[in-house]
Amino acid sequence: MKEYSTNTVYFISYAKLPMEISAANMHKVVGVGLIINEDTGIIEDTSCTLITEEARKFIKQVIVGYNVHENGIEPLIEKIKKRFHGSSQKAICVAIKGTYEKYMIWKNE
């Protein structure tokens, strides 16, 4: 099992999937979780409830290492829109934004 440092936090949000994709038959929503180092803002790991292993791995490769403190979330969303062209793209972007917003609310409290 992967070990995370004590200065990492996990947040997750969900977004509705389009009904025409196979994942919607199993799950009505897609969840995207981010493990963020609260000191540096670097996303150290991610989880995604997409069905195919390739899609999960690809999304992880695009997200991990991104710094939300330095860059905010919009450049990451644009990167996903440019590189990931699955039918669940919009839902993934919505879930990531929601996760980021939850993190920022927590960080600013």
Image: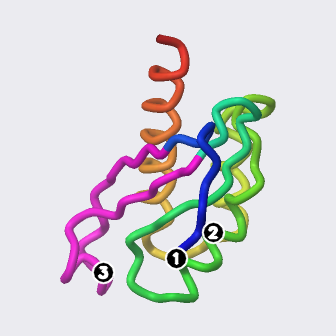
Circle 1 crowding by C-alpha within 10 Å: few under 14, some 14–19, many from 20: few
- The quadrant in which residue 36 appears is top right
Circle 2 crowding by C-alpha within 10 Å: few under 14, some 14–19, many from 20: some
Residue 39 picture location, percent across and down: 71, 30
Question: Which residue corresponds to the image point at 38% horizontal and 84% vertical from the top-left?
Answer: 51
Mark whose residue sits in front, 1 or 2: 2
Label placed on residue 60: 2
CB-based contact (under 8 Å), mark 1 and mark 2: no
- The quadrant in which residue 16 appears is bottom left
Question: Which residue corresponds to the image point at 75% horizontal and 49% vertical from the top-left?
Answer: 66
Mark with earlier residue (1, 2): 2
Query: Is residue 24 magenta-colored?
Result: yes
Residue 92 picture location, percent across and down: 47, 59
For badge 3, the amino acid type reads: Ala
For badge 2, the amino acid type reads: Lys
Relative to 64, say whether 11 is above or below: above
Q: Residue furthest top?
A: 109
Label placed on residue 23: 3
Question: Which residue corresponds to the image point at 49% horizontal and 65% vertical from the top-left?
Answer: 47
The CA distance from mark 3 to mark 2 is 18 Å
The CA distance from mark 1 to mark 3 is 11 Å
* Residue on which the image places disc 1: 86
Q: Secondary structure at mark 1?
A: loop
Mark with earlier residue (1, 3): 3
Q: Secondary structure at mark 2?
A: helix
The CA distance from mark 1 to mark 2 is 14 Å
Q: Secondary structure at mark 3?
A: helix
Magenta residue span: 10-35
